[in-house]
Image (cartoon, grey):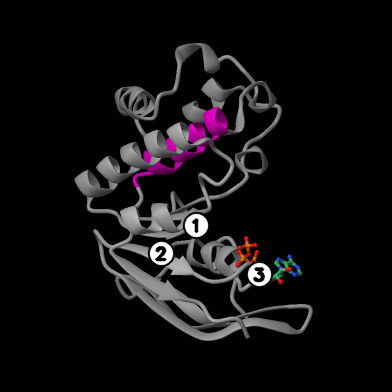
């Protein structure tokens, strides 16, 4: 189980949220719902170990997130261009993933990655194309939990549907726990098995 215990987050002395606790079981798909600025991205980053809370802790099966090796909680964000090295071709980015070639090829096909994209740099891909690579990279790390923070906000409806369809198949096959945020009520209704409300402070 992925558990957040009594998390408090603050920037420059301003509390964003406090005493926030959350538990996510494998196979659950939890939407974190809150108005803009309430701290969804901040929570997503803390859950995946990218940021430390001011107080509280994140545990997976009772233990802190490991500091070394691939993190069992993988984060996919809203801005794939910020999550990729602009000097690295996409083939090189995927080569760093821990999955073997066969699994990478399977994931690439599942998420509609075209072979001709592999020799390009991030700025030579559209946001939707680049996001597919970020999702594949996250899944190639073989996570137990996936944090999907507004991952399809910038995409057209068709691309959004394709990506989420493939993600749901992966989540079900792997019994992944999913924590996601979206401003789309329709998407949330389709994906979520549970909704957690984050109240603004
Ligand atoms: N590095 C930072 N330094 C200072 N303040 C920050 C920092 N990151 C976020 N904040 C502030 O913390 C609050 C929560 O930000 P966050 O991005 O987590 O909100 P959000 O709920 O994801 O918003 P949105 O729905 O608009 O994406 C906001 O008021 C934001 O301005």
- Residue 25 showing in the rendered view: yes
- Residue 97 showing in the rendered view: no
151 vs 54, nearest the viewer? 151
140 vs 34, nearest the viewer? 34
- From the viewer's perspective, is residue 192 above or below residue 55? above
The quarter of the rendering in which ligand 1 is drawn is: bottom right
Asked where in the image residue 64 lies, by quadrant, the reply is: bottom left
The residue depicted at 54 percent of the width and 17 percent of the height is 117
> Is 16 placed left or right of 13 in the picture?
left
Q: Position of residue 129 (x, y in %)?
A: 53, 28
Residue annotated with mark 3: 37
Which residue is outermost to the right? 12
The residue range painted magenta reads 128-142
Residue annotated with mark 1: 182
Does residue 141 belong to the magenta stretch? yes
- From the viewer's perspective, is residue 45 above or below residue 105? below
Mark 1–mark 2 CB contact (< 8 Å): yes
Q: Secondary structure at mark 2?
A: strand
Q: Secondary structure at mark 3?
A: loop
Mark 2: C-beta under 8 Å from nearest atom of ligand 1: no
Q: Which disc number belongs to residue 31?
A: 2
Q: Position of residue 97 (x, y in %)?
A: 45, 35
């Amino acid at each position: 189980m992925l558990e957040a215990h009594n998390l408090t987050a603050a920037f420059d002395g301003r509390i964003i949220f406090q005493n926030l606790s959350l538990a996510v079981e494998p196979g659950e798909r939890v939407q974190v719902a809150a108005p803009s600025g309430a701290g969804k991205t901040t929570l997503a980053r803390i859950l995946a170990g990218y940021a430390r809370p001011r107080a509280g802790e994140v545990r997976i099966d009772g233990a802190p997130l490991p500091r070394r090796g691939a993190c069992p909680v993988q984060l996919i964000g809203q801005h794939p261009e910020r999550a990729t090295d602009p000097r690295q071709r996409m083939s090189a980015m995927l080569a760093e993933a821990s999955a073997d070639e066969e699994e990478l090829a399977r994931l690439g096909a599942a998420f509609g990655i075209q072979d001709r994209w592999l020799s390009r740099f991030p700025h030579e891909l559209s946001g939707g194309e680049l996001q597919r690579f970020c999702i594949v990279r996250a899944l190639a790390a073989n996570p137990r939990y996936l944090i999907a923070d507004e991952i399809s906000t910038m995409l057209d409806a068709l691309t959004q549907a394709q990506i989420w369809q493939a993600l749901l198949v992966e989540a079900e096959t792997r019994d992944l726990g999913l924590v996601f945020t979206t401003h789309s009520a329709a998407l949330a209704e389709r994906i979520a098995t549970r909704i957690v409300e984050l109240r603004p402070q």
